[in-house]
Amino acid sequence: MLGKRDQVVGFKEQKKLAANFKDYNLLILEEAGHNLPIDQSNLFSNCVNYFFKL
């Protein structure tokens, strides 16, 4: 899960890294930055809960 507006890590670099794995899901949130859990807290929580099937 990445924030498209991340100025610290950058989503493009992470996208390239993720391509090295054969089984992965990559979610890029348009309106989030490096503080993704704060920028998009509800969406972040929903995605984490879905991932862990809570």
Image (cartoon, rainbow, N blue to C red):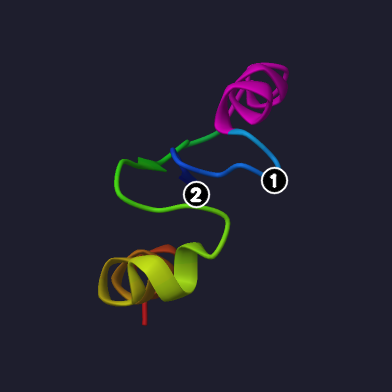
Q: Position of residue 54 (x, y in %)?
A: 36, 82
Q: Quadrant of residue 42?
A: bottom left
Look at the image and say whether residue 22 sits in the magenta stretch.
yes
Q: CA distance from mark 1 to mark 2?
A: 15 Å
Confirm whether residue 52 shows in the render: no
Vertically, is 12 above or below 6? above
In this view, the residue in front, 45 or 49, is 45
Q: Position of residue 49 (x, y in %)?
A: 38, 75
Q: How many marks do you count on the picture? A: 2
**Label 2: which secondary element:** loop
Q: For the residue marked with disc 1, what is the amino acid? A: Val
Vertically, is 36 above or below 25? below
Confirm whether residue 8 shows in the render: yes
Q: For the residue marked with disc 2, what is the amino acid? A: Met
Residue in the image at 38% along x and 67% along y: 39
Look at the image and say whether residue 45 sits in the magenta stretch.
no
Question: Which residue in the structure is indicated by mark 1?
Answer: 8
Residue in the image at 49% along x and 49% along y: 1
Drawn side of residue 23 relative to residue 1, left or right: right
Which class describes the residues within 10 Å of circle 2: few (<14), some (14-19), or many (20+)?
some
Q: Which residues are magenta?
A: 11-23
Q: Position of residue 22 (x, y in %)?
A: 63, 21
Q: For the stretch drawn in magenta, what is the main secondary structure?
A: helix
Which of the two discs, 1 and 2, labels the residue nearer the N terminus? 2
**Label 1: which secondary element:** loop
Drawn side of residue 20 relative to residue 32, left or right: right
Question: Which residue in the structure is indicated by mark 2?
Answer: 1
Q: Position of residue 16 (x, y in %)?
A: 66, 17
